[in-house]
Image (tube, rainbow, N blue to C red):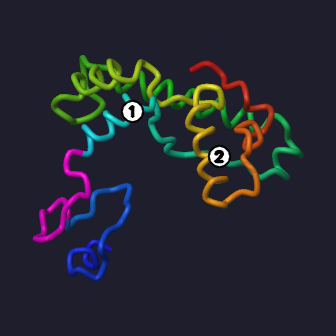
Amino acid sequence: MPALLRDGALDGIVSPRVPSCVRDRAPGVGRLVEDFRAAEQAYYLRTGFFPIMHLVGVRRTLADAHPWLVTSVLRAFVEAKRQAMQDLAQVNFLRVSAPWIAADLEQVRDLMGIDYWRYGVAANRAELEAMTRYAFDEGLTERKLAPEELFHPATLEAPAA
């Protein structure tokens, strides 16, 4: 895909990773928003939203057959997040080879709070409400769904991290 972008066959792409032609500063190729970090921070300050990055799904037939499964999966992810955040905050020996990681983490926490990757329906209610509103407004759903309708009832109360 980067070659198509670099060669002008594509006008743009949305990607979780920076395409090599952008990273390598190929002529005529760049970010749509050059100072994306400032733009994202301004959006967060204006809305309180930090876009939800991933959802984990469990097939309904499995959840129905094994009611404990959805809460066990949620607890496992909450524990993994707790361990990852603890490792990231470890500054006497860095888990990430970035020179200003401690300062960056402090800046993120100052802006967004300690739990900036929030888990659970309650903690993400505003974002979920917006997403279901957008889906309805764009005709993707027949009606505006409540966030609770998107999740298994056993996961509506997220375990503490």
- Magenta-colored stretch includes residue 29: yes
Element under label 2?
Answer: helix
User: Mark 1 or 2 closer to N-term?
Assistant: 1
Residue linked to disc 2: 132
For the stretch drawn in magenta, what is the main secondary structure? loop
Q: Toward which corner of the image does residue 141 lie, by quadrant? A: bottom right
Contact? badges 1 and 2 (CB < 8 Å):
no
Q: Amino acid at mark 1?
A: Tyr
Query: Label 1 to label 2, Cα distance in Å?
Result: 19 Å
Magenta span of residues: 22-35
Give the side of residue 144 with respect to residue 30, left or right. right
- Residue at x 66% of width, y 34% of height: 74
Q: Is residue 128 above or below residue 3?
A: above
Residue linked to disc 1: 44
Closer to us: 147 or 4? 147
- Magenta-colored stretch includes residue 116: no
Q: Is residue 93 above or below residue 138?
A: above
Q: Quadrant of the N terminus?
A: bottom left
Q: Toward which corner of the image does residue 11 lie, by quadrant? A: bottom left
Give the side of residue 1 with respect to residue 141, left or right. left
Element under label 1?
Answer: helix
